[in-house]
Amino acid sequence: MKKRIKLMIIVFALSVALQGVDIPTVCASETAADISKNKQYSEISGIGETLFASDLSDTSDFELHSDSNGDKVISKRQDFTDFVLEADITVGKGTDEEDGAAAHGGLLFRTSKDKETGEYNGYYFALDILKQQVALVKLSADGWNEIATKKMSIEYDKVYHATIVVAEDHIICYMDYNGVSYAKLDIIDETYTSGGIGVYHHILNADYGELKVSAYTEKEIVENESYINPVFDKCADPDILYHNGTYYLYCTTPTQEGNSGIKVYTSTDLVHWTDQGFAFFKGDGWGDSNFWAPDIIERDGVFYMYYAADEHLCVATSESPLGPFKQDIYEPMHEYIKEIDAHAFYDEVSDKYYLYFVRFTAGNVIWGAELNDDMKSIKEETLTQISRANQGWDEDMMRVNEGPYMLVRDGKYYMTYSGSHFESVNYGAGYAVADSPLGPFTKYENNPIIQSNSLVHGAGHHCVAASPDGKELFMVYHCHHSLFATDPRRLCIDRMQFTEDADGNIVLEVNGPTVTPQELPSGSVNVDNFIEFKETDFEPVIVNKSMTVEEIMEQLPTELLIRTSQGNQGSAVIVWNLDNNIIEGGGEEIIVKGMASLPETVDNLGNIPLDVEVQITFDMPTADIENQEGSRYSSLIWVLMVLGIGVVTIGIAIKYFPQKRK
């Protein structure tokens, strides 16, 4: 078995001890190297030649340093800039398992000695067993400054393979990368640009091995093929509907606009959004203010919008995803119960619709129930508590589980949700799993799967959308406006996926929150997509049957105004299918069919039918009308003549044959 860092530290200890200096010893797992040989790790794309490698048995390339941040083993080489750093890490049990200082181990990089303080500054990527997370920390004379963390199951005496990818100010940290799993952390920081590499041992029972530094060239992401979060301003509590090739985004908008209703935005790639105005106006349904967290679902050609107003849930409907959404009867779902954050879900297995929402029972608690066929009320007897705050991270500042969103995979129901107060540093998103839509649900032990950090505040309330080709999933969430202000909140998107953990269990993971350039969703195009015709109900056209086809065609509508995803004004030209056979084969009324032709700048990604039709009503031909009018005129003369003769006859009779007097 190869000698490992434990051996190197002992050599250092002996040499330093001769000078009368005491240093801590490091305990190591004797089987760690053997275990690591059996693991398979994937190579990072862009990796180049090996710049530095050590089995950690040779002390000549390292030096030991002690300062206020603990004891470190640092490479003498200090010119590493862009690189891939890899090593095996094992943390052994100490005498005090609750000692947080001892229950971690990790890699140092871009470390250099501060000339004024004599201390080493740099970055530290660590396994933290007590907190069950990985962390990226910035070390300086001021101490440890946490940049970001991610929950992860970590065991004592188990080998983990750490991979750190560094390119200029971009730092990506993996643990046990298998070619499919997402990075644990993906951040931007330009504090330290070069330096040495090493390990941090302090009083740790840590074991390290197979340390290697390789050259790295970061893949260039073309600007028009990528995005950077946030992708949109002035949007909180997002919900997305994908319909006929267009994404529809509905949000809680800032207070001034938000008190006027709920707006809708459209896109074809989840990145570039167009403001389409209000989908729901105040006054078109119950509620005076605080129009929050809309959720939209389509059923049988009708779109249902579930929204919160004055902390009551309401349902409005429309025949178009653009609206206007209206209520037939102005009322909330429950007049005397406060509720927010509705999410409607169709279960293909049971062919039933469900509604999930939040009530203020012992904090913000998620409830679920089956919807009635009217889609506007729930079956009260099915009301079930789904999830409440109980994992620690979701209890900071306030006990909160809210913003539910359901996913289904292989017969399992994944309820994702937000946890903790929206201004808490712990605010993020987690999930729970069940075998049926109403549970019972079991929470994932490594929640949250996305969380606020020092670069992104307020990463939480979300929905999930698939890429246009259906190959990728995206968590669509809001974040705070800045590190110092909550509102107006902003829209972010990051990839999420179902994958296997180290034990072969299916888990959900999110590649985020990211602040670096990311590739556009697969299959996406930023185009002006056809949504609908503004009006297709033509008034019947009245024509004369003696008119030619060409003359009748001149009386028909020639174009239709259209609505598009980029909100551009335009019209579609109509080509009608009309000939003499259609005219002669019809009666007094015929239906003429036609096809609308979209402008060249407008796509039809959803293959929406462009068929149109109009009713033609035939009036009398001109000659027939004249003959009919002449006939009526002649008849009138004969009537008058007859009446005249009758009047004269009566007059004569009265004159010459007077009645007898009594």
Image (tube, rainbow, N blue to C red):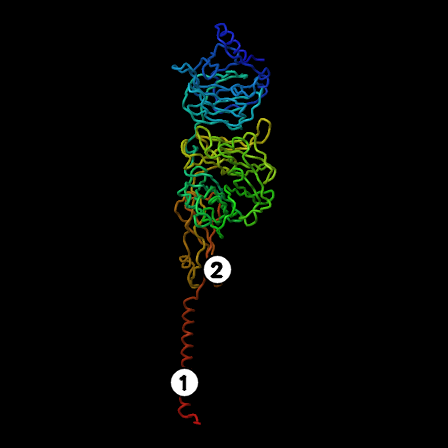
Image coordinates of residue 598 in percent, x first then y, are 43, 47
Residue 76 picture location, percent across and down: 45, 12
Q: Nearer the viewer, residue 581 or 387?
A: 387
| Separation (CA) of disc 1 from disc 2 | 50 Å
Say which amino acid is labelled 2: Ile
Q: Which residue is mark 1?
A: 647
Q: Eyeballing the image, is 4 above or below 645?
A: above
- The residue at which mark 2 appears reads as 590
Depth check: 263 or 358 in front? 358
Amino acid residing under circle 1: Val
**Mark 1 surroundings within 10 Å by alpha-carbon count, few (fewer than 14), some (14 through 19), many (20 or more):** few
Residue 469 visible in image: no
The residue shown at (52%, 16%) is: 203
**Between marks 1 and 2 in the image, the one whose residue lies nearer the viewer:** 1
In this view, 165 is above or below 589: above
Give the quarter of the image for residue 414.
top right
